[in-house]
Amino acid sequence: MDDCDCVFGRADLAGLGDDEVLEHLDRCGTCPEVQSDPGRVLLERLRRSARDLRRTANRARQAERELAELRVEVDRSEQRIANLERVQKVSTREVLQKNALLAMISSITIAANEAESEADVYRICMHKVCSASGWSLARLTPASGGSSRWHVADRLASEFTGLLVDGEPTSLGLDALRGGKPVWAPDLRARLDAPWIERAAALGLRGGAALPVVVGGQVIAVVEFFGTAGEGTATALMLAMATIGAEIGRVLARLRADEAAAHARDVAEVASRTKSAFLASMSHELRTPLNAILGYADLVHEILDEQGPSDVRGDIVRIRQAGEHLLGLINNILDLSKVEAGRMPVICERFDLGALIRDTADLLRPLLDRRNNVACLDLAGDLLDVETDPTLVRQILFNLISNAAKFTDAGTITIAATRQTDPSGAPWFQLAVADTGIGMTEEQCAQLFEPYRQADPRLARRAGGTGLGLTLCRGLCTLLGGTIAVYSAPGRGTCFTVRLPLG
C-alpha cells in the first residue's frame, strides 16, 4: 500500500469535488486512512451529500418537466385568452352596433310620435336614419306616384341626386314595394343594372337599402337609402329597418285616424251649429202661429162663457192645454238651440230672488196639484240683492220644479235658496229643488243631462217631455257662470242643486 495514491495525502484535497473524493475512496477502500474513524465519518458525509445531490438533481429534472408542461399550458391559456379577446371585441362591436340601432329606433319613434303631419314623420325618419347609420342620401317615393322627398346628408350625396329619376324608385325600392319588407344591397353594382351605377361607384356611393312604409297592411311609400358600403351588418340593419318601418306605419295610421276623427268632429260641429242656428232663427216663425192658436182658443172660450153652457167648452180647454204643452216643448228646443249656437242673450239686473221663486212656485201650482204634491219653500232672508238674468233663473227653476212634479205622486217638493261664499271670498247663491219621488240610479244620473236622453223612457212617455229640460238647465247654468248637480237614490227622491254667482 506504499504506492497508494491516497486521497488524504493529496495537496489539492480541499479543491476536489465530492464526486472525485468518492471515486478515490472507492479505489482505495482498504486504505488505513479510509478505515480510520475520521475517514469513515468523512466517507459517510460524502455519501449522504452524494445522495442529496442525486435527489436534488432528480427534483430539478422533475421541475424542468413540470415547467415545460406549465409552459405548454400557459401557451394554451394565452391562445384561449386571445380567442376570448377576439370574441369579446366582436361581441362588444355587435352590442355597440345593436345599441346604436336601438337608440336610433327609439329616437325615431319618439320624434315621429310628436310629429303633426305625415311630411314631418318622413322627414324625421330620413334624417334620423342617415345620422345614426351614416347613410349619405335618403329618398322617399309614394307608391301611388308623385314627386320624391329627399334628405341629402353630405356633399357626396348632392352629386348623386342628379343620377336618380325623381318619382321613380330604383329596382331596389321596387323590390321593397312588391315584397313589403326591407331590402339590403351592400354592393349596388351587384344588385342593380342601371347606367348610373358606375358613376355612383366612382363618387363613392356603393351600398343601399330600401324600407317600405306599411299602413293598414298596404305599402304606401318606399324610403331608399344610399351610402358607402358597409353601413352596419345586414342582419342587424334589416331588423332595425323593419322595426322602424312598423313604427312609422303605426304613427301614420294614428295620424290618419286623428285627421279623420278631427274632420268628422268638425263636420259634426258645423252641422250642429247649422242646426242650432236654423232652429234659433225659426223661433219667431214657430212661436207666432202657436201663440195665435192659443189666443184664439182663449177668445172662443170667453165667447162661450158669455153665451152660457156649451158642449164644446171642454174641447176648447183641451185645445188650450195641448197648445201650452206644445209651446213649452218648442220653447225648450228653441232655447237649447240658442244656447248651443251662442245666441242666447244674458241680461243681468238686480232683483228679489225670493219673490221670483215664490212667483214661479205659484205659477206651477196647478201642475203640482195635478199629482197631489205639496210645495215647501225654504228661503233665506238675504236674497233681495241678487244680480243676474232673472229670466234665465226663472227658466231653470221652471224646468226643475216641473221635472220634480212629473215624477212625484202625493209627495213634497222642497225649493230652497241660500247665499254662500266660496273659499276665494266670491259671493254665490244656491238653489235646490228636492222631491220625494221615485229617484234614480247612478247610471241614470250619469246620462241625465245629455240631450234627448231620459232616465226611464217608460215613465217619460207617461210624464211627457222631450228630454231637453235638464240639458237646457245645464246650458243656462254654464251661460250664467254656474253649475248644476244631481243627487238621487231609487225610492228616496232626487235633489238638483244649482250654484250661480250673485253678480
Image (tube, rainbow, N blue to C red):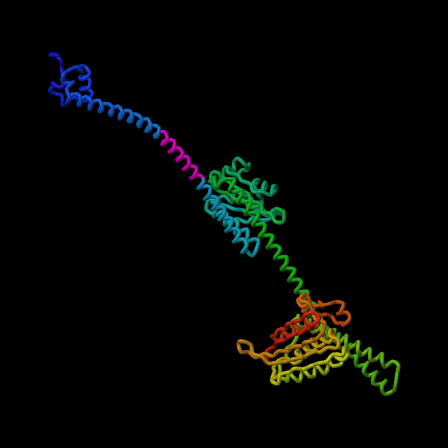
Q: Residue furthest bottom?
A: 306
**Magenta: main secondary structure:** helix
397 vs 76, left or right, is right
Q: Judge left or right: residue 50 versus residue 3.
A: right
Residues in magenta, as a range:
72-90
Please identify the quarter of the rendering in which residue 49 is found.
top left
Report x, y in % for residue 383. Answer: 62, 84
Determine the residue located farthest toward the front in the rendered image: 37
Residue 243 % position (x, y)? 55, 46
Q: Looking at the picture, does residue 196 appear above or below residue 250?
A: above
Towards the viewer: 31 or 91: 31
Point out the image quarter for the N terminus: top left
Residue 197 visible within the image: no
State which quadrant residue 403 falls in.
Answer: bottom right
Determine if the magenta segment contains residue 58: no
- Residue 156, given in percent of the width and then of the height, sits at 46, 44
Q: Nearer the viewer, residue 440 or 254?
A: 440
> Does 202 sit left or right of 384 as displayed?
left
Magenta residue check for 78: yes
Does residue 157 sit above or below 482 in this rendering?
above
- Note whether residue 168 is visible: yes
The percent coordinates of residue 320 (x first, y second) are 80, 79
Q: How many marks?
A: 0
- Residue 358's quadrant in the figure? bottom right
Taking depth in this image into account, of 205 and 18 the one nearest to the observer is: 18
The quadrant of the rendering that contains the C terminus is: bottom right
Q: Which residue is more in the foreground, 15 or 173?
A: 15
